[in-house]
C-alpha cells in the first residue's frame, strides 16, 4: 500500500511539474518583426538545431579560443552559474553564443547547467518576467558566484569572450 501511495504521489508531482513548466526551445512569431524567433528557455539541442542552428554551429565549429586562457578559466568556471540571454534575430547573438559555448566546452564546463533564455525583439519573453535580469542589449552573458552576479559581457566582448570571462572570474576565490 505504501509503495502505491508513494508511486501515486511521485506521479502526481511529476505531472504537476510538467504541466506548469515552460516549453523549451519555443518558436513564436515576433509581433514587432513579424518573423519567427526563439522565445524562452533554451537548451543546447535547441541552439544546435532548428532556427538558430546554422549560426550557432558555424561559430561553434570555427571559433578557436585561446587555450592558455581557457585553461586558466577552467579552474574557476565550475564554481559559477552562467546565464545567457540572446535574440535568435540578433547579429551579435548569432556571432557570440556559439563561441561562448565553444569556450565552455573546451574548459570542460557542463553546458547543460547554463541557463539560456531567448528573447523577442522587445527583449522580453512572452508569459515570463525576466526584468530582474536587467537586459538592455543581447547577447548578455551573466556570471554569478554564490548566487550574486559578479559580471556580464554585453553584445560583443571588449577583448575576446574568453579574456573577458577570465577577467570576470578573477572575482571568484
Image (cartoon, rainbow, N blue to C red):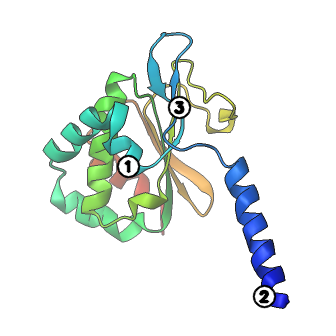
Q: In this view, does 51 lie to the left or right of 8?
A: left
Decide which of tag 2 and tag 1 comes sooner along the chain: 2
Count of numbered labels shown in the rendering: 3
Image spot of residue 72 (x, y percent): 28, 65
Image spot of residue 64 (x, y percent): 15, 49
Which residue is disc 3 drawn over? 39
| Tag 2–tag 1 contact (CB < 8 Å) | no
Q: State the residue at coordinates (42%, 52%).
A: 168
Secondary structure at numbered mark 2? helix
Neighbourhood count class around disc 3 (C-alpha, 10 Å): few under 14, some 14–19, many 20 upward: many
On the question of residue 106 being in view, the answer is: yes
Decide which of tag 1 and tag 3 comes sooner along the chain: 3
Which residue is disc 1 drawn over? 45
Q: State the residue at coordinates (76%, 57%).
A: 16
As drawn, the label of residue 3 is: 2
Residue 128: quadrant of the picture:
top right
Point out the frontmost of discs 2 and 1: 2
Considering only vertical position in the picture, is 98 above or below 34? below
Marks 1 and 3, how far apart at CA: 14 Å
Point out the frontmost of discs 2 and 3: 2
Secondary structure at numbered mark 3? loop
On the question of residue 161 being in view, the answer is: no
Q: State the residue at coordinates (56%, 30%).
A: 135
Amino acid at each position: 500500500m505504501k509503495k502505491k501511495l508513494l508511486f501515486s504521489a511521485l506521479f502526481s508531482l511529476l505531472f504537476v511539474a510538467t504541466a506548469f513548466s515552460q516549453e523549451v526551445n519555443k518558436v513564436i512569431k515576433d509581433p514587432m518583426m513579424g518573423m519567427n524567433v526563439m522565445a524562452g528557455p533554451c537548451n543546447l539541442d535547441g541552439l544546435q538545431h532548428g532556427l538558430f542552428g546554422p549560426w550557432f554551429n558555424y561559430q561553434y565549429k570555427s571559433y578557436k579560443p585561446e587555450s592558455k586562457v581557457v585553461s586558466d578559466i577552467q579552474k574557476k568556471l565550475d564554481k559559477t552559474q552562467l546565464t545567457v540571454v540572446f535574440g535568435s534575430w540578433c547579429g551579435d547573438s548569432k556571432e557570440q553564443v556559439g563561441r561562448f559555448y565553444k569556450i565552455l566546452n573546451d574548459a570542460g564546463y557542463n553546458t547543460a547547467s547554463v541557463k539560456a533564455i531567448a528573447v523577442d525583439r522587445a527583449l522580453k519573453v512572452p508569459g515570463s518576467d525576466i526584468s530582474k535580469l536587467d537586459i538592455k542589449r543581447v547577447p548578455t552573458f551573466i556570471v554569478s558566484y554564490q548566487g550574486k552576479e559578479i559580471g556580464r559581457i554585453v553584445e560583443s566582448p571588449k577583448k575576446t569572450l574568453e579574456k573577458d570571462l577570465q577577467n570576470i572570474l578573477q572575482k571568484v576565490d
